[in-house]
Structure formats: C-alpha cells, structure tokens
C-alpha cells in the first residue's frame, strides 16, 4: 500500500511539473520577464506609466507630483524664439562603448570620452544613448515614429538630454544599421552589458540648426527633474524594419516604450531659429 501511494505521488508530481512547463511555454518570454520589472509601459498596469508615482511613492513620487515632467508637446504657438540660445554647441568623438538590453529599451553606454555638449557655459559629457518607439515628445501635436535620447551629465550629476526625432522612410538610419548585429546579439538577454568596441556618436547627433529647449525631467522612474531638454526640429529617416528590430529585442509590454505627454504647467519653451541661415 505504501509503495502504491508513493508511485501515485510521484505520478502526480510529474503531472504538475509537466503542466507548469506547458503553461510556462505558453507565455511569451517578454511577458514573463515584465512581471518582475520595476516598471512597465503597459497602460493601466499597477506599475504602468500612470501609476509610477504611486507604485513606489518614496522613490518615484516625482513621476506623479512633479510639476516639470517630460515629455511634453512642443507647440510653436507656445515656443518663444530666443536667438541668444545660439547654435547647438557639441563636439562628439568615437569612444569605447557597451550595449545593454534593459527590457525597457536598448542602451549604448560610453566607457571613454565620447565628447560633450555645452549649455550656458556648463559642459555636459555624453554618457549614454537609447531609443523610444514611438517618439515621446510631440511637435505641434504630431508624434513621430521614434525618438533617440543622447544623455549627457556633468561631474555633479546635472543632466542634459538631446532628443532626435525619426519618421519611417525607405532610407535606413546608418547609425542603427551599424549597431544591428549587436542589437540582435542582446535581443535574448536582459541586463547583461556587452562591449561593442568603438562607437561614433556623430552618426546619431542632431542635424540642422533649429531646436527646442525647455526644463523637464527624466522620462523613466525616478522621473528626476532639473533636466535640460533639447529637441531637434530636423527629423531623421529610419526604416520600419529598424524600429521593429528595437521593439522585438525588449519585453513584449515595453515595445511601445513612450511615456505619455505630461502637463506643461506654464513652463517656458524656447526655440532657436537662425534668421538668415537655411539649415
């Protein structure tokens, strides 16, 4: 009798294990990973963008309570032309870099000196770049297909971000094309930083000379404010397949990884448009 009960118990255990494996296989890998993420972009989720500030109120409270949050709509009706901003003052150079799939986005991090951006005499060093699909900022209510963020910091951890907008075209983005094999390599990994050699950020730099400037925040938790935002007016081309490459790599719930627009709250938006130069 004991032996019979033992055999029945083993059979039941095996059946439960088989059922668990079948259930696990039925759930997409991205969905399983997202269950344990600190935040997601899934609308309405407890840790979705509308709830970031209440999900971890002590750490991410600014996401809900902050009055200078990003992204925003860059409306020409609100933007004030400011010639004194001057042409965008940056100088980038190739540097050793790594690539990381966070599950929320694909990040390229610079390990060496990749150059800098100077704003009002303050030098911000380029540290990282990553992509959002679709764009986070809108221009006159229009949302673009993708937005690249070039993240700069000072030694005192002041942050300045340059946003570059993209729209789908038959023309590929050369910078993304060079990174394609590395993005494919990390598409099945999470939080495993891998070296990718020299990367030249000039291929991702702002083109043209018209840009918007305002004070905002990080667009991901903890939504830290005091970030100097520069969003380039000139839109760059990208192929649909390149956007899909980025989307397939991250978790399924984060393939549309743009934070919703935030209230302007009477902030100033400046725009630099040189009066005589066509660019």
Image: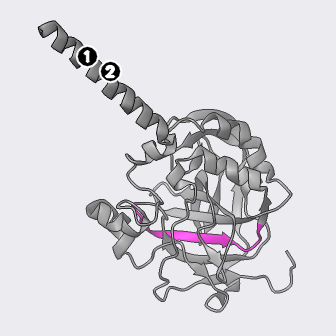
Residue picked out by circle 1: 10
Q: Which residues are magenta?
A: 221-235
Q: Quick one: 195 or 219, which is closer to the camera?
A: 219
Residue 69 at x, y = what percent?
A: 46, 74
As helix, strand or loop, the secondary structure at mark 2 comes to helix
Residue 68 at x, y = what percent?
A: 44, 77
At 87% across and 78% down in the image, what residue appears? 278
Q: Quick one: 46 or 125, which is closer to the camera?
A: 46
Q: Quick one: 227 or 33, which is closer to the camera?
A: 33
Q: Is residue 76 magenta?
A: no
Viewer can see residue 188 = yes
Residue picked out by circle 2: 14
For this orientation, the residue located farthest to the bottom is 77
At 52% across and 54% down in the image, what residue appears? 254
What is the spatial separation of the Cα atoms under label 2 and label 1, in whole angstroms?
Answer: 6 Å
Asked if the residue under mark 1 is in contact with the one under mark 2, i.e. CB atoms within 8 Å, the reply is yes
Q: Is residue 234 magenta?
A: yes
Q: Quadrant of the C terminus?
A: bottom right
């Amino acid at each position: 009798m004991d032996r019979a009960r033992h055999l029945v118990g083993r059979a039941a255990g095996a059946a439960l294990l088989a059922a668990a494996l079948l259930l696990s296989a039925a759930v997409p890998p991205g969905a399983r990973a997202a269950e344990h993420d600190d935040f997601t972009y899934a609308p309405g989720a407890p840790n979705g963008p509308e709830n970031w500030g209440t999900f971890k109120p002590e750490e991410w409270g600014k996401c809900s309570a902050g009055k200078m949050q990003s992204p925003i709509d860059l409306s020409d009706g609100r933007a004030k032309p400011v010639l004194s901003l001057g042409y965008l003052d940056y100088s980038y150079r190739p540097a050793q870099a790594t690539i990381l799939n966070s599950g929320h986005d694909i990040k390229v991090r610079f390990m060496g000196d990749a150059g800098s951006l100077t704003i009002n005499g303050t030098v911000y060093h380029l540290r990282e770049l990553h992509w959002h699909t679709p764009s986070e900022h809108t221009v006159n209510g229009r949302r673009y297909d993708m937005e690249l963020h070039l993240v700069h910091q000072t030694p005192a951890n002041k942050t300045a971000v340059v946003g570059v907008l993209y729209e789908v075209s038959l023309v590929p983005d050369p910078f993304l094309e060079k990174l394609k094999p590395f993005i494919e390599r990390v598409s099945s990994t999470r939080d495993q930083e891998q070296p990718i050699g020299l990367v030249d950020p000039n291929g991702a730099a702002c083109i043209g000379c018209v840009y918007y400037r305002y004070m905002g925040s990080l667009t991901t938790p903890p939504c830290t404010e005091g970030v100097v935002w520069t969003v380039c007016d000139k839109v760059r081309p990208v192929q649909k397949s390149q956007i899909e490459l980025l989307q397939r790599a991250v978790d399924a719930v984060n393939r549309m990884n743009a934070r919703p627009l935030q209230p302007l709250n009477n902030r100033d938006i400046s725009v630099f448009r040189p009066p005589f130069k066509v660019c």
